[in-house]
């Protein structure tokens, strides 16, 4: 009986010890679990903050990409517009050159047909008895101007000179009908009026390309023409002075 009682005591002691150990382990496990849960919660909160930060960064990058794309679209549109404008200007230049070539060919042909126009400086202005351009000169002027370039001209006559004013008015009418832009005929007082026709530009740098064309046309039809530079006259325009003309 004593042996049984001793055995029971040992079993009871072992059970208590086991229970105590188990309790300790459970306590430790519970504490560690709480610690792990707290750490996991902190990690989740930290991860949530990083996710929000990444989302903000992604949104910022998306906006920057959209702005960059918009700038690229605008730049491409501007580039396309500039290419289109450059192409239009190039085509206009080609058209102007073509008209000038046609006009120069017509002037050259007229020179070959009329041997009396080979030395232009010796030619005198042909006028009808009433004054002004002759009918033949008006017809030739119209024919030669038609295929050539067009531009702006300012026409002046000598104040008080009826023949100069009449000739300038006839010239203004022919040029206007051919598509040139003029401001009519302006009378001007000259201390020493030029003889015949004078073509004046502000400077060589601003002289329009059609100035030489007008000079060739005038000499071809037999007009006494001179050319000079005077900064009193408008830039980028050709001034035609119809000076003193003998009837």
Image (spheres, rainbow, N blue to C red):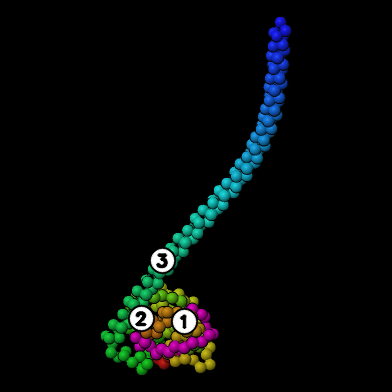
At 35% across and 88% down in the image, what residue appears? 222
Residue at mark 2 to residue at mark 1: CA–CA distance: 22 Å
Residue 52 in view here: no
At 47% across and 61% down in the image, what residue appears? 79
Picture coordinates of residue 31, whole percent (x, y):
70, 29
Residue at mark 3 to residue at mark 2: CA–CA distance: 33 Å
| Residue at mark 3 | 87
Instruction: Give the quadrant of the C terminus.
Output: bottom left
Q: Depth-wise, is mark 3 or mark 2 nearer the camera?
A: 3
N-terminal label among 3 and 2: 3
The magenta stretch spans residue 228: yes
| Residue at mark 2 | 141
| Residue at mark 1 | 207
Query: Is 227 or 95 nearer to us in this picture?
Result: 95
N-terminal label among 2 and 1: 2
For the record, the magenta segment spans 219-243
N-terminal label among 1 and 3: 3
Q: Pointers 3 and 2 in contact (CB under 8 A)?
A: no
Picture coordinates of residue 78, whole percent (x, y):
49, 60
At 34% across and 86% down in the image, what residue appears? 220
Picture coordinates of residue 115, whole percent (x, y):
28, 90
Above or below, 20 against 86 in this view is: above
Neighbourhood count class around disc 1 (C-alpha, 10 Å): few under 14, some 14–19, many 20 upward: some
């Amino acid at each position: 009986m004593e042996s049984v009682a001793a055995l029971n005591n040992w079993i009871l002691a072992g059970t208590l010890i086991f229970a105590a150990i188990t309790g300790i382990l459970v306590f430790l496990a519970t504490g560690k679990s709480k610690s792990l849960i707290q750490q996991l919660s902190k990690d989740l909160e930290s991860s949530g903050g990083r996710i929000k930060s990444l989302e903000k960064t992604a949104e910022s990058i998306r906006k920057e990409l959209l702005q960059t794309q918009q700038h690229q679209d605008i730049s491409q549109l501007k580039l396309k517009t500039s290419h289109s404008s450059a192409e239009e200007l190039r085509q206009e230049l080609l058209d102007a050159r073509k008209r000038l070539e046609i006009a120069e060919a017509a002037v050259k042909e007229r020179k070959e047909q009329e041997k009396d126009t080979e030395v232009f400086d010796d030619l005198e202005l042909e006028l009808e008895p009433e004054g002004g351009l002759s009918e033949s000169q008006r017809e030739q002027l119209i024919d030669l101007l038609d295929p050539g370039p067009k531009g702006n001209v300012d026409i002046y006559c000598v104040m008080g000179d009826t023949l100069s004013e009449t000739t300038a008015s006839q010239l203004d009418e022919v040029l206007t009908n051919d598509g040139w832009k003029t401001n009519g005929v302006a009378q001007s007082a000259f201390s020493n009026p030029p003889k015949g026709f004078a073509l004046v530009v502000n400077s060589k740098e601003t002289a329009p390309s059609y100035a030489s064309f007008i000079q060739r046309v005038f000499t071809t039809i037999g007009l006494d023409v001179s050319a000079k530079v005077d900064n009193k006259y408008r830039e980028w325009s050709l001034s035609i002075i119809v000076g003193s003309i003998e009837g």
